Image (cartoon, grey):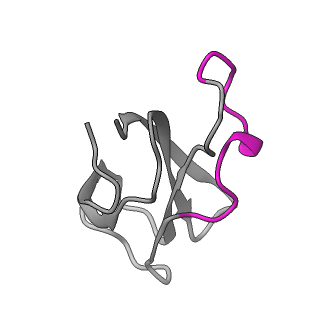
């Protein structure tokens, strides 16, 4: 169980790619976990953005984050934006804020 405002390391394993940023979103309060995840189910702004300015990250990255004020079950969506294409990679984590 996660505590609101607690610090959290968000680890990812990545390939050697020029990177614009890593952005982390969490689902809105009241989202329905029985429904497919949509952009509308996420808070509009990321709770954490790590800018890389086109640099390549190491093969394993961990971004310390302060968790937003949430209760209950949520999803955290990590978006890894690639600098030299329009592509992005995504990863989800199922979390419980209690």
Q: Is residue 59 visible?
A: no
Residue placed most toward the observer, 2 or 17: 2
Q: How many labels sit on residues?
A: 0
The residue at the point 50 percent across, 70 percent down is 21
> Is the N terminus in the top left, top right, bottom left or bottom right quadrant?
top left
Residue 64 placement: quadrant: bottom left
Residue 27 location (% of width, % of height): 58, 43
Residue 17 location (% of width, % of height): 43, 63
Q: Does the magenta stretch include residue 6?
A: no
> Is the C terminus in the top left, top right, bottom left or bottom right quadrant?
top left
The residue at the point 64 percent across, 65 percent down is 45
Relative to 89, 65 lies left or right: left
Relative to 86, 79 lies left or right: left
62 up-or-down from 53: above or below = above
Which residues are drawn in magenta? 33-46
Q: Is residue 1 visible?
A: yes
18 up-or-down from 97: above or below = below
Residue at the far right in the pictured view: 40
30 up-or-down from 22: above or below = above
């Amino acid at each position: 169980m996660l505590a609101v405002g607690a610090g959290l390391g968000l680890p990812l394993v990545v390939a050697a790619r020029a990177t614009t940023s890593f952005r982390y979103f969490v689902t809105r309060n009241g989202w329905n976990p029985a429904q497919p995840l949509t952009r509308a189910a996420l808070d509009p702004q990321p709770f954490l953005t790590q800018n890389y300015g086109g640099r390549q990250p190491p093969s394993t990255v961990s971004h310390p984050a302060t968790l937003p004020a949430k209760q209950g079950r949520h999803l955290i969506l990590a978006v890894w934006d690639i600098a030299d294409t329009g592509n992005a990679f995504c990863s989800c984590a199922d979390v419980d804020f209690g």
